[in-house]
Image (tube, grey):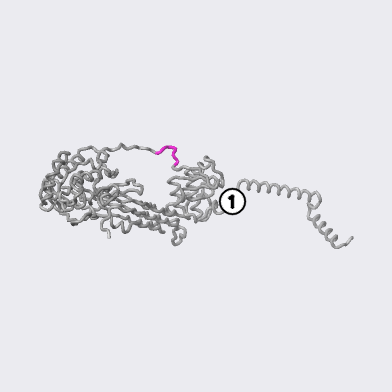
Amino acid sequence: MASFVDRVVLHVSGGTGGHGCVSVKREKFKPLGGPDGGNGGNGGDVILRVSAQTTTLLDYHHAPHRHATNGGPGMGDWRGGKNGETLILPVPDGTVIKTKDGEVLADLVGEGTEYIAAAGGQGGLGNASLSSQKRRAPGFALLGIEGESSDIVLELKSIADIALVGFPSAGKSSLIAAMSAARPKIADYPFTTLIPNLGVVQAGEVRFTIADVPGLIEGASEGKGLGHNFLRHVERCAALVHVLDCGTLESDRDPLSDLAIIEAELEKYAVDMSYAGVDGEVVPLNERPKLVVLNKVDLPDGKDMAEFVRPDLEARGYRVFEVSATSHEGLRQLGFAMAEIVKAARDAVQTAPPKVAPPVLRPRAVNESGFKIRREEKNLEPLFRVLGEKPVRWVKQTDFTNEEAIGYLADRLAKLGVETELFKVGAKPGDTVVIGEDDGVVFDWEPTMMAGAELLATPRGTDIRVADIGDRPTRSQKRDEQIERREAKAAARAELEAERKAGIWTESVSGRRAQAVKESHLDSGDDD
C-alpha cells in the first residue's frame, strides 16, 4: 500500500445553508403577536491549511470526498439556526491547488497559509426578517442555498533549497543520509528511493534543506521510470546537484554520458507557472546553478574514474566535488558550496523588489442592471434566459410550494427590472422564460405578475395573483366577455320593452289583480 502520495483529485463541497422559519408569536391574551421566525444558519466552508505535521496527501487519496457541515434551520421566538462548522483540511507545505484543466488556483507556502476551496451556502431569512410596514405578517421564509462544490487537484512540490538528481543507485540517498539526520531507505538495487526525501544541512551559519529525488533515466520527461512524477519536487529548488556514479559496474555507462542524459531530460521538462521568482519569471531547471558530485571515490575504480572525468567537467564550467558517502570524504566542502548558492539565492529574493501589477479599479457602471437576458430558441419557439447573480440566487431561495413566496419573487424580479427588460427584448405573454443556466427554473411569462403583493389582502401563504393563475383569462378573452355582457344587456332591454308595449306591465295593484282574475277565468273556461 502506498505511504506517500503527492497528487490527488479532491472533491470538496461547502455546507448548505439552513432554511428560514415561518412562525407567529403567540402569548396569553395576544394570540397574534407578529412574526418571530428566525434565520437559517450559514453552511460551513472547506479550507485547505498548511500544517507542519502533514507531509503527504495520503489521507485524501483514501478519502477524496470532503463535505462541510450544513447550517441549522431557523426556529421560532427569533432563534437563528446554528452556523455550519468550517472543515479544515491540513496539507503539506508547498501544496499547489489546480483545476482539472491545469489552472493554478493557489500555491500554499508557509505555515498557516489558507485557501477556501468551497464556500458554504447562505442561510435563508425567516419571516421576522422579511416583515415590513406593508408586509406585516409574511407567511413564508427564504430557503437556504447549497454550498459551492468543485473538483480540485492537489500537487505537492517539496520545499527544498537544493535538489540531488542523478541515475538510480548513484548514491543520492546515501549522500543525504551522510550530510543530514534523514534516514532514507538505502539498498544496492535500482529505484530504491520511491518517494522524495528531505534533509536539513547546517553549513556554518547557513541552514538549508536538500531533497533526494527518485532516480532519473533516459525518457523521464516523457513519463518513463519514476523521475517524471517527482520532477515537480525540484521546481522550487534554487540549485541542482548532479550526483554521478563513478563506481558503476555497467559497461555502457560513465559519468559524462549520465550527465548528458540527465541534462537533456531536465531541459525537456517544462516548469509550470505555479512557482516563479520575485520578478514573476520561471527559470528552467537546466538554467539554474549546478554542482557536480563525483560519488563513490572510496572505491579504487571510483577514484580513478573521478580523476579521469574531472578535467573535462571543469572545462565545461562545472564546479566538481569528489565525495564519498561512506567515508564522508569531501562532504564538508560540498556542504559549504551548497550553502554559498543558497545564501546568494536568499539574498537575491530579499533585495530584488517584487514585480507587483498595479491594481485596476473597475467601478460598477451607473446603468448596470446586474443581470442580462439572452434570447434563444427551443423547438422553434422563442426562449428568454435571465442570467445574473441576484436572479439566480433569489430563485434558489424561493419555496415554490408557497404562493406568497412566489409572489415575493415576482416582486423582487419586477423591482430589479427583469419584466421591463423582457418587454424590451421582445418577449410576449406566454413565452418561455428560464432563470439560470441549464438547471434553471422554467416558467411561462405572465406580465400581469406586477409588484404589489404587500397590498393584497390575502391570508398568509397565499397570493391571489398565483392562486388562480391557471384560470386567469387573457386580455382578448376579457374583451370577448365584455362584448357578450353588453349584448346580453341589450337583448334583455329589448325584451322588456316588447312586454311593456304588449300591456303585460300595469302601473297599479288593482289593475294587476284584475288581470290575474281574468286570466284565471280564461283558464277555467267560464265566459261570464
Q: How many marks?
A: 1
Q: Is 151 on the left-hand or right-hand side of 294?
A: right
Badge 1 is on which residue?
472
> Does 366 lie within the magenta span?
yes
Q: Residue at x 13, y 43 (%)?
A: 310
Q: Position of residue 198 (x, y in %)?
A: 20, 52
Query: Quadrant of the image for the C terminus?
Result: bottom right
Q: For the view shown, which residue lies furthest in the front direction?
A: 251
* Category of crowding for the residue at label 1, using alpha-carbon neighbours closer than 10 angstroms: few (below 14), some (14–19), many (at least 20): few
Observer-nearest of 191 and 195 = 191
Q: Position of residue 378 (x, y in %)?
A: 53, 47
Q: Is 473 on the left-hand or right-hand side of 250?
A: right
Q: Residue at x 49, y 54 (%)?
A: 400
As drawn, 214 above or below 369:
below
Q: Give the magenta part as a residue range.
A: 364-369
**Disc 1 secondary structure class:** loop
Q: Is 173 on the left-hand or right-hand side of 64?
A: left
Observer-nearest of 373 and 420 = 373
Q: Position of residue 258 (x, y in %)?
A: 20, 46
> Does 42 lie within the magenta span?
no
* Amino acid type for the residue under numbered disc 1: Arg
Residue 105 visible within the image = yes
Residue 171 visible within the image = no
Observer-nearest of 158 and 493 = 158
Magenta stretch, main secondary structure, is: loop
